[in-house]
Amino acid sequence: MTAPGPITVASYNIHKAVGTDRKRDPRRILDVLHEIDADIVALQEADMRFGSRVSAIPVDMIAEHSAYKPVDYDIHPGGIGWHGNAILVKRGVNILSHAPLHLPVLEPRGAVVADLAVHGRPIRIVGMHLDLSGLWRRRQVRAILAQVAARSRIPTVMMGDLNEWAKAGGCLREFSPAFQVIETGRSFHSRRPVASLDRIMLGRGVELLACGVHRSAKSSRASDHLPIWAKFAI
């Protein structure tokens, strides 16, 4: 019997699909996701911030021009996320359960969780976009960890835009010892990356195989962040 293959995840702050050329081009975001070809993608700034807060990538476009389906949090009609956080999964991935995570906030922030089955294996994904304030970031990480700990125990991967400029300090310390913060590389700004604002954290039982930042001609223009990715076995 053939053992299940590795799982690839990606995290991408899509800046509401507005690129460094100041053009809103959601199809370009989908092209970048096609380049990465991850099984699961956590998006930040995926919904419009004002008005009806619809998805920055039209839901019909996701269905027609990608291999993904959004985890439907059903919070805003036409939206796919919670405070801009969304999770896309390949169509062969089964969605077992999902929920928004409520955070202590100074400004509108949130996180989302989804329990999935990939290649028949359960995995929990948490997507987040944390505050600009270091104090609030630490509080938010503690809130996320507490809410996840209250759920059943399955292999867990957390990822998102942490807004943390420190290489190893700040809110990153809050994930230890339950999670390993992996070094994917610098992702911001996409034109000249100087900071690792985007991070992936692996829980116990998740074995890292490879990771990195996805830099291409399209990803360098599609958003002000570059997407990051990790491949692992569970």
Image (cartoon, rainbow, N blue to C red):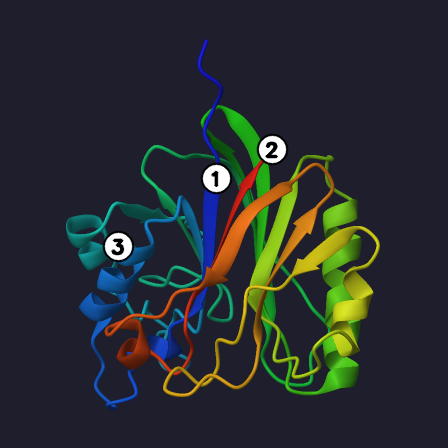
Do residues under tags 2 and 1 come within 8 Å of each other at their CB atoms?
A: yes
In the rendered image, residue 137, in percent from the top left (x then y), is placed at 72, 77
Q: Nearer the viewer, residue 201 or 151?
A: 201
What residue is drawn where x is 52% and y is 50%? Answer: 210
Amino acid found under the numbered disc labelled 3: His
Q: Nearer the viewer, residue 25 or 180?
A: 180
Placement of the C terminus among the 4 image quadrants: top right
Q: Which mark is residue 7?
A: 1
Q: Is residue 181 above or below residue 2?
A: below
Q: Earlier in the sequence, mark 3 or mark 1?
A: 1
Query: Can the viewer see residue 5?
Result: yes
Q: Earlier in the sequence, mark 3 or mark 2?
A: 3
Q: CA distance from mark 3 to mark 2?
A: 24 Å
In the rendered image, residue 181, in percent from the top left (x then y), is placed at 69, 60
According to the image, label 2 marks what residue?
234
Q: Which mark is residue 34?
A: 3
Q: Is residue 12 above or below residue 97?
A: below
